[in-house]
Image: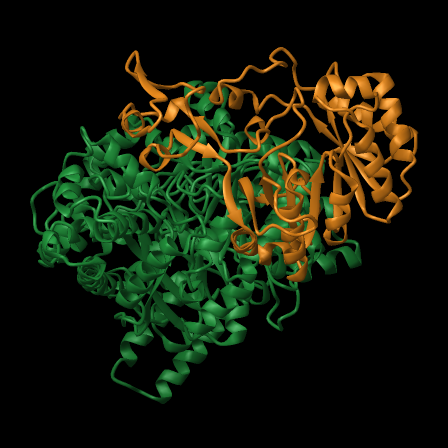
Chain colours: A green, B orange
């Protein structure tokens, strides 16, 4: 723990107290721009000019006491919208304003602006409308049934992480590279040279736009400095002006400039488009280390000042709620968190241990700030010292779900398996919740969650959704005619294959939509090799292009399959007829049967090979359906397994399942066992999960819940360290810990006003418990709690 | 249960639980094998289902869905309907276990099942990777492992043969011959010391302590690694006289590693209800952490390393 300055305490308090509200400023500016300029230019130039229009005009916020400056909206938590992607209706605005969880205040004025200017202009023009119009009836039916979700229906492709390039070069240097690429194009004129030239010009314009935005901050700081009476603050404002005049146009020279360079870059990306999972600094300890060490060496920086600047950056992240979501997107990701993730530790590009003094300082910041954003993860390698894990374990024990814990050695192997070079893989890490990427060089886009238990329900009903009677999947036969488990599994597999293909065909159209209509020239500037190729980030410009479909409900589908196998096909204690009737009746009058299914089934998470083999079969079936499929960006599909909050929505659209789960209740999350099904402690859970060949994923998410007593002392922390190290030795990707007991959570449900500060781990992120929907709260309470033996 | 030829090893015994991720029963991550049966009946025992040597029926009322499968199944007529719920007559129940597989709600279980050495080994082998990472292993506890000394000896030898670290959690109430048979396969003794005064020991545990203290001395003299474990039960073991005597005893053991203070807790209280037994410390509260620290300081002043376990 370090001492928090009065300045930081004040800024932090302001950030926590500010209420998220919709700001119409961006919507107005972008609408005015399109009204006056469209459609005269090709889309890349149009987007670059739109960004320049925004950054030239949007309100500059420079608050009292701030050292790191810049906001996405006109003030902290004044949240911009992106009508060109998703234009909220008045009904949407009323919902956002009035809903109990994750509300955004909408003033009468904002509502009027929307009614008068925004909605009339964008009706029929937004990407969201174009996207749904481009989908087939088959896609729409599966989407409506809750078989999968669609990440791009309200937001742009994201999950993007920066490497170290902005710390070594300024945007003026990037523009020099653009000139070089243009010269190369002139030399070798090809069929798409004109398009490339346009794209490069768009990148050049967008770089100017961000430099201009920084200059406006410098001017504002000078203006404030001239009026400032306190000499200390006057000096700070003068320094802010100097920093903003330097970065991001030129490479940062010191620690302060490096942090500010990142923050301007972050704002540029997230103002350009509302990218899914924001934008992340990635391996922050490694990127800032040279500046930190040089500053300490020449006396221009102290440890305390470094901590304070980092704390100011943390507050900046926390000031930015995720863009407001409605509909299915709100259901699958109901949180203010925008999933920026700071990676700590791991290995260096040369394979050496990446943990440094700055890593520990950053962990202090994580603990002291105790903010939801940015999320922090530790990247554990075999080379990582125990002291690193121990420091993290002490923070985990304080019970706010951070930092999450990743196996960096496995991440490198996952990336190499996907075709990255070893050097690029070592510069990678995790982002969003648990997703891996080659930072600064990859467009890895999550496209939607896939409801595995729902697909089993379809298989058990010959492809028809029992909730609606609509046909969703292919006819795979009447279950009453199946001779054995293999028949059931073949039907399930056929449904998975078919519905993944439906989803992927939808993705093809959506990828083209973004490539053609919504390029992102500023983001393209930052990701190799968009400049060299003269191609947009959304159009295959990145060195690596990966498309993910995220499997959800692995525990539920495994237990459900295991139950049918055990009771219908092996013991023959229940007929298929009887089981289906019980499911359709949601076990009404069949409680004894439900108990049999719940308690006498080999269940995933208990190190029981009978169940775990079913899990492996499900994994292989899903992997085979997705992995290796080509995308329209010249890239490849892979799988990962994580839920955010979608396991609640996916459960809500699902009837009773053969594992004894009642209709409408949440399915399991991530790769975790069904809530309460694991009964043999954390080692059994870890061994079960590790039977999955996780190296062939792009990330798996495992939640563990410990009582505070289990981590209260050195013995407990040592145990945790050994659990993590062993799980990683066995090939685990990620694990995160909720350290809270169920009694506390129940008390918070009963008296939310007394527990507003209670933070829990949800999926790959933490959230205020009282901000979660009731079903999600109940689901977290139901997760198995490992207590001291 | 501990029958068989004198001096031999028994290939099966009665176990009532196997718990993984035990981190307070010796070094590292461990699996603890709980033996059924104990000669003592300590007032504060939090595993009452472990005391009787044979199987016992446990009923979890809250899980019962009143399906009546147990009433129909019981061959002894021990389960009958009373006010709409199945009620078990302990006198008639022979803990035969017939009802257990039919109780799908898992409201009924029989504590204690016969396991072979091979079965226990297969169970404990599952977490080998965790033991190796953490310097952990397997702990035999109970109940009282020394009530089944031949089974314990066979298990310990087999585990040692596989390179697993072993700990034996014992009250010490057994013949020296029994210890002699297995002590070489024990890497660490977790040895209970409750009350030094023989009369008090007899009152609160049901047996005297002469043999217990003699075995402790002999194990120490034989060079074994020993951790003493003392339950801190308010009003019973935490008197100054007892603490002074325990401290003197601990200080006289040259190879003592440390003394663990186990704070009394009431978590086991509900188990008595499930067994339809009365609990004698109903009104005793758990000691606060400050008291445990004070006792640790008291031991430290006498040269004995002690702390909360």
Measured along the vertical axis of the image, is residue B309 above or below residue A533?
above
A340, A173: nearer the viewer: A340
A633, B233: nearer the viewer: B233
Query: Which residue is the extreme one toward the bottom?
Result: A187
The quadrant the N terminus of chain A occupies is top right
Query: Number of callouts in the render?
Result: 0
Look at the image and tell me whether residue A236 can be seen: no
Look at the image and tell me whether residue A507 can be seen: yes
Residue A637 appears at what percent x and percent y?
A: 31, 67
Quarter location, residue B220: top right
Q: Residue at horizontal 72%, vertical 18%? A: B204
B130, B289: nearer the viewer: B130
Q: Residue at horizontal 36%, vertical 34%? A: B98
The quadrant the C terminus of chain A occupies is top right
Quarter location, residue A478: bottom left
Measured along the vertical axis of the image, is residue A119 above or below residue A486?
above
Q: Residue at horizontal 54%, vertical 29%? A: B49
Residue A171 appears at what percent x and percent y?
A: 50, 64
């Amino acid at each position: 723990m370090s001492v928090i300055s009065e300045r930081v305490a004040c800024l932090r308090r302001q950030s926590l107290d500010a209420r998220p509200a919709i700001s119409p400023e961006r919507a107005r500016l972008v609408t005015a721009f399109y009204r006056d300029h469209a459609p005269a230019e090709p889309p890349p130039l149009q987007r670059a000019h739109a960004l320049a229009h925004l950054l030239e005009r949007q309100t500059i916020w420079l608050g009292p006491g701030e050292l790191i400056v810049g906001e996405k909206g006109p003030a902290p938590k004044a949240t911009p919208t992106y009508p060109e992607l998703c234009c909220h209706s008045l009904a949407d605005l009323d919902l956002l304003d009035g809903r109990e969880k994750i509300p955004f205040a909408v003033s009468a004025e904002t509502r009027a602006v929307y009614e008068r200017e925004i909605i009339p202009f964008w009706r029929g023009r937004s990407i969201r409308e174009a996207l749904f119009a481009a989908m087939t009836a088959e896609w729409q039916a599966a989407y409506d049934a809750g078989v999968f979700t669609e990440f791009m229906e309200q937001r742009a492709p994201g999950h993007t992480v920066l490497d170290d390039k902005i710390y070594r070069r300024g945007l003026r240097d990037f523009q020099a590279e653009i000139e070089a690429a243009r010269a190369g194009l002139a030399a070798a004129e090809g069929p798409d040279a004109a398009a490339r030239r346009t794209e490069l010009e768009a990148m050049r314009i967008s770089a100017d736009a961000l430099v201009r935005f920084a200059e406006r901050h410098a001017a504002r700081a000078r203006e404030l400095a001239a009026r400032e009476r306190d000499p200390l603050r006057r000096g700070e404002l003068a320094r802010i002006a100097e920093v903003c005049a330097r970065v991001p146009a030129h490479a940062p020279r010191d620690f302060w400039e490096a942090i500010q360079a990142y923050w301007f870059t972050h704002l540029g990306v997230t103002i350009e488009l509302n990218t899914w999972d924001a934008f992340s600094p990635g391996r922050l300890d490694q990127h800032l280390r040279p500046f930190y060490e040089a500053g300490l060496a020449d006396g221009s920086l102290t440890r305390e000042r470094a901590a304070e600047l980092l704390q100011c950056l943390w507050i900046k992240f926390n000031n930015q709620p995720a863009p407001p979501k409605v509909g299915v997107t709100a259901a699958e990701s109901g949180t203010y968190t925008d999933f920026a993730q700071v990676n700590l530790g791991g290995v260096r590009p040369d394979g050496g241990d990446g943990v440094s003094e700055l890593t520990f300082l950053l962990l202090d910041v994580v603990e002291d700030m105790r903010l939801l954003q940015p999320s922090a993860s530790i990247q554990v390698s075999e080379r990582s010292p125990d002291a690193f894990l121990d420091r993290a374990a002490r923070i985990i024990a304080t019970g706010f779900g951070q930092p999450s814990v990743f196996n960096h050695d496995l991440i490198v192997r996952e990336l190499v398996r996907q075709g990255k070079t070893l050097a690029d893989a070592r510069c990678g890490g995790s982002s969003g919740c648990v997703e891996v990427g080659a930072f600064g060089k990859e467009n890895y886009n999550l496209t939607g969650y896939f409801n595995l238990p729902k697909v089993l329900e379809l298989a058990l009903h010959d492809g028809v959704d029992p909730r609606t009677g609509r046909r969703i999947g292919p006819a795979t036969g009447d279950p009453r005619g199946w001779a054995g488990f293999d028949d059931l599994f073949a039907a399930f597999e056929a449904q998975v294959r078919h519905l993944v293909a439906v989803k992927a065909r939808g993705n093809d159209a959506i990828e083209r939509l973004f490539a053609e209509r919504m390029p992102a020239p500023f983001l393209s500037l930052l990701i190799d090799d968009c400049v060299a190729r003269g191609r947009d980030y959304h159009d295959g410009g990145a060195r690596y292009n990966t498309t993910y479909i995220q499997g959800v409900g692995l525990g539920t589908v495994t237990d459900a399959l295991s139950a049918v196998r055990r009771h219908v096909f092996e013991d023959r204690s229940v007929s298929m007829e009887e089981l289906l009737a019980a499911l359709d009746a949601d076990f009404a009058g069949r409680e004894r049967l439900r108990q049999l299914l719940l308690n006498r089934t080999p269940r995933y998470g208990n190190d029981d090979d009978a169940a775990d083999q079913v899990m492996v079969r499900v994994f292989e079936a899903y992997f085979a359906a997705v992995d290796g499929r080509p995308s329209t960006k010249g890239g490849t599909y892979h799988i990962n397994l994580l839920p955010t909050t979608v396991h609640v929505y996916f459960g809500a659209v699902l009837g009773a399942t053969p594992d004894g789960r009642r209709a409408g209740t949440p399915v399991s999350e991530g790769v975790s066992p069904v809530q309460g099904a694991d009964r043999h402690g954390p080692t059994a859970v870890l061994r079960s999960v590790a039977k999955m060949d996780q190296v062939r994923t792009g990330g798996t998410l495992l939640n563990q819940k410990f009582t505070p007593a289990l981590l209260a002392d050195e013995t407990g922390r040592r145990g945790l360290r050994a659990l993590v190290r062993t799980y990683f030795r066995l090939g685990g990707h990620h694990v995160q810990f909720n350290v809270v007991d169920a009694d506390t959570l129940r008390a918070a449900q009963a008296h939310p006003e007394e527990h507003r500060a209670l933070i829990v781990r949800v999926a790959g992120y933490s959230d205020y418990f009282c901000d979660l929907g009731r079903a999600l709260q109940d689901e977290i309470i139901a997760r198995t709690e490992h207590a001291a033996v | 249960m501990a029958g068989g030829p004198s001096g031999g090893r028994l290939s099966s015994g009665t176990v009532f639980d196997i718990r993984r991720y035990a981190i307070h029963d010796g070094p590292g991550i461990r699996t603890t094998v709980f033996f059924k049966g104990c000669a003592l009946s300590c007032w504060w025992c939090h595993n009452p289902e472990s005391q009787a040597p044979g199987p016992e029926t446990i009923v979890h009322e809250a899980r019962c869905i009143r399906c009546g499968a147990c009433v129909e199944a019981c061959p002894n007529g021990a389960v009958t309907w009373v006010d709409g719920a199945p009620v078990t007559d302990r006198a008639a129940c022979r803990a035969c276990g017939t009802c257990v597989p039919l109780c799908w709600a898992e409201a009924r279980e029989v504590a204690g099942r016969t396991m072979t050495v091979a079965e226990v080994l297969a169970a404990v082998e599952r977490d080998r990777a965790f033991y190796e990472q953490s310097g952990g292993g397997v702990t035999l506890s109970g109940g009282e492992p020394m009530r089944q000394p031949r089974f314990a000896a066979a298990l310990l030898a087999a585990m040692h043969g596989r390179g697993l670290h072993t700990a034996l959690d014992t009250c010490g109430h057994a013949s020296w011959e029994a210890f002699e048979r297995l002590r070489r396969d024990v890497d660490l003794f977790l040895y209970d010391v409750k009350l030094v005064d023989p009369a008090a020991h007899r009152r609160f545990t049901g047996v005297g302590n002469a043999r217990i203290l003699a075995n402790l001395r002999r194990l120490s003299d034989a060079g074994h690694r020993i951790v003493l474990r003392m339950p801190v039960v308010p009003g019973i073991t935490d008197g100054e006289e007892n603490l002074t005597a325990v401290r003197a005893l601990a200080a006289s053991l040259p190879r003592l590693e440390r003394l663990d203070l186990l704070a009394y807790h009431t978590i086991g209280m509900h188990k008595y209800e499930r067994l339809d037994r009365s609990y004698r410390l109903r009104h005793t509260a758990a000691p606060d952490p400050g008291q445990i620290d004070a006792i640790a300081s008291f031991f430290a002043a006498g040269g004995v390393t002690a702390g909360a376990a």
